[in-house]
Structures are given as C-alpha cells and as structure tokens.
Image (cartoon, grey):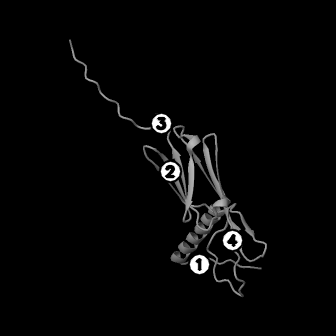
C-alpha cells in the first residue's frame, strides 16, 4: 500500500499544486504525440514539426522551412485545391553502438505542414529549392494580383 502525504506548509503546498498543474499541462500538450520504438529497440521516433517562415511581397509568397538532416528525396510538396502540403521524413542515421546513452534530443520521423494558399497565387509556376537544410517554396502571384500604378490623365476643360 502507498501513502500519499501532503505538507501543511503553505509554500510547499503551493509548489505541489504548481507541480501538479505543470504535469497536467505537459500531459495535455503531448497527448497523442506518436512515439514509437525503432527496430533496434534503443531510440524513439516521433512526429516533429519543422519551423517555417512565411513572407509575402508584391511578387508572391515565400515559405522557408528548416529541414536539417532531411534528404531532398524524402520531401514531397503537393497542392490540392488551395492547400499546399509539405511532408517528408527525417531518417535516423546509423549510430555507433555504445554501452550507455546519455541523451537523445534530436527528433526523427515523419513531418507534415499545410498552408492555405491565397487565390492570387499562380499555381502553375510554384517552385521549390533546397539548400543547406532549408527548403524554399516560392509561390508567385498572378499578374492580375500584382500591384500596379494607374496613370492619371489630365483632361482639358472646354
């Protein structure tokens, strides 16, 4: 049988309450986080979300995603209706077998990011490049959507 004790000291009780709240917060945040053991039984693979920057200027929209360690062949980009999806997988490289593992902090596994594309984007001319672990997707705007100057003509009164 286990006995659960609570302190009567208000400061300790507050810390215990805060500890419980933080545990619940992390449980909720990571609930459903898919973690699976790899075939070797030594490491965990989970879904990770690569960070992105999204910019827009007069010529189009640009999405830049950090994908360190991901091979370009393992990245797929698709556009369906107005949803651009970037998905892929970061594979774990073979590691030297050791007696002890002190820390695993890097994430491996599948990823997927989806973005709603504005109707002003020219879907036929979307381009993607990959350099130094950064994927850049350029979504040019249609000519009719680009800002333009309208000339003001002077009319002479009669």
Tags 2 and 3 in contact by the CB under 8 Å rule?
A: no
Q: Nearer the viewer, mark 1 or mark 2?
A: 2
Disc 2/disc 3 C-alpha distance (Å): 17 Å
* Nearer-N-terminus badge (1/3): 1
Answer with the quarter of the image where residue 7 lies: bottom right
Query: Is residue 117 depicted above or below 69 in this figure?
Result: above
Q: Nearer the viewer, mark 1 or mark 4?
A: 4
Q: Find numbered disc 3 in the image and state the secondary structure of the residue it sits on.
A: helix
Q: Find numbered disc 1 in the image and state the secondary structure of the residue it sits on.
A: loop
Q: Find numbered disc 2 in the image and state the secondary structure of the residue it sits on.
A: strand
Answer with the quarter of the image where residue 108 lies: bottom right
* Nearer-N-terminus badge (1/4): 1
Disc 3/disc 4 C-alpha distance (Å): 43 Å
Name the residue beneath numbered marker 4: 92
Q: Find numbered disc 4 in the image and state the secondary structure of the residue it sits on.
A: loop
Q: Residue at the location (59% across, 63% down)? A: 67
Q: Is residue 130 left or right of residue 75?
A: left
Name the residue beneath numbered marker 1: 7
Residue extending furthest right? 39
- Crowding near the residue tagged with mark 3, few <14, some 14–19, many ≥20 C-alpha atoms within 10 Å: few
Q: Percent from the top left, x then y, of residue 5?
A: 65, 78
Disc 1/disc 2 C-alpha distance (Å): 55 Å
Disc 1/disc 4 C-alpha distance (Å): 46 Å
- Crowding near the residue tagged with mark 2, few <14, some 14–19, many ≥20 C-alpha atoms within 10 Å: some
- Crowding near the residue tagged with mark 1, few <14, some 14–19, many ≥20 C-alpha atoms within 10 Å: few
Name the residue beneath numbered marker 3: 143
Q: Residue at the location (57% across, 59% down)? A: 130
Name the residue beneath numbered marker 2: 62
Residue extending furthest top? 158
- Crowding near the residue tagged with mark 4, few <14, some 14–19, many ≥20 C-alpha atoms within 10 Å: some
């Amino acid at each position: 049988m286990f006995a659960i004790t609570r302190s009567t000291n208000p400061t300790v009780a507050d810390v215990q309450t805060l500890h419980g709240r933080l545990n619940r917060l992390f449980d909720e945040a990571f609930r459903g986080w898919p973690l699976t053991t790899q075939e070797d039984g030594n490491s965990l693979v989970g879904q990770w979300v690569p960070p992105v920057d999204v910019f827009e200027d007069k010529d189009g929209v640009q999405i830049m995603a950090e994908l360190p360690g991901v091979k370009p062949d393992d990245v797929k980009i698709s556009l369906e209706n107005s949803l651009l999806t970037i998905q892929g997988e970061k594979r774990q490289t073979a590691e030297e077998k050791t007696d002890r593992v002190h820390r695993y902090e890097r994430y491996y596994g599948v990823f997927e990011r989806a973005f709603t594309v504005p109707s002003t984007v020219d879907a036929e001319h979307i381009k993607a490049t990959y350099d130094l672990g950064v994927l850049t997707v350029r979504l040019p705007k249609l000519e009719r959507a680009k800002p333009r100057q309208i000339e003001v003509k002077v009319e002479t009164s009669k």
